[in-house]
Amino acid sequence: MTDSPVTVVPVVTPAAPVRPEAYDAATRAALEHIDRQAARGRGRPGRTRKGYAQDWASWSNSAPLLAVAPAPW
């Protein structure tokens, strides 16, 4: 192992637009499509949703009460 200093170069990534109006029309359309799929529960395969539900039930039966709620999948 060497004791020479290591130079770290920061990487700056521009922030995403904060307001939906700041996105272009194609990006807004894609995001709205994703939102609609998620709202209908089609964002994840059925077996994944079933597995998540079983995991949540197992965890919620064994964990202390906290201020959390399952996602509406």
Image: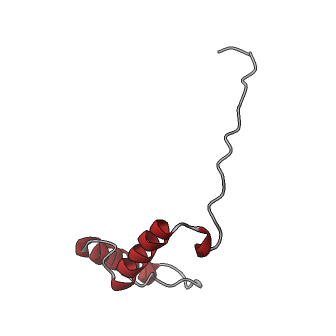
Q: Position of residue 7 (x, y in %)?
A: 73, 25
Q: Residue at x 63, y 65 (%)?
A: 17
Q: Looking at the rendering, which quadrant does residue 68 occupy?
A: bottom right
Q: Quadrant of the C terminus?
A: bottom left
Seen from this angle, which residue lies furthest left? 47
Q: Residue at x 49, y 78 (%)?
A: 63
Q: Quadrant of the N terminus?
A: top right
User: Is residue 67 depicted above or below 24 in this figure?
Assistant: below
Q: Residue at x 58, y 74 (%)?
A: 20
Q: Looking at the rendering, which quadrant does residue 51 occupy?
A: bottom left
Q: Position of residue 60 (x, y in %)?
A: 44, 82
Q: Residue at x 74, y 16 (%)?
A: 3
Left or right: 54 with respect to 66?
Answer: left
47 or 58, which is in the foreground? 47
User: Is residue 1 depicted above or below 38 in this figure?
Assistant: above
Left or right: 17 with respect to 33?
Answer: right
37 or 23, which is in the foreground? 23
Left or right: 27 with respect to 11?
Answer: left
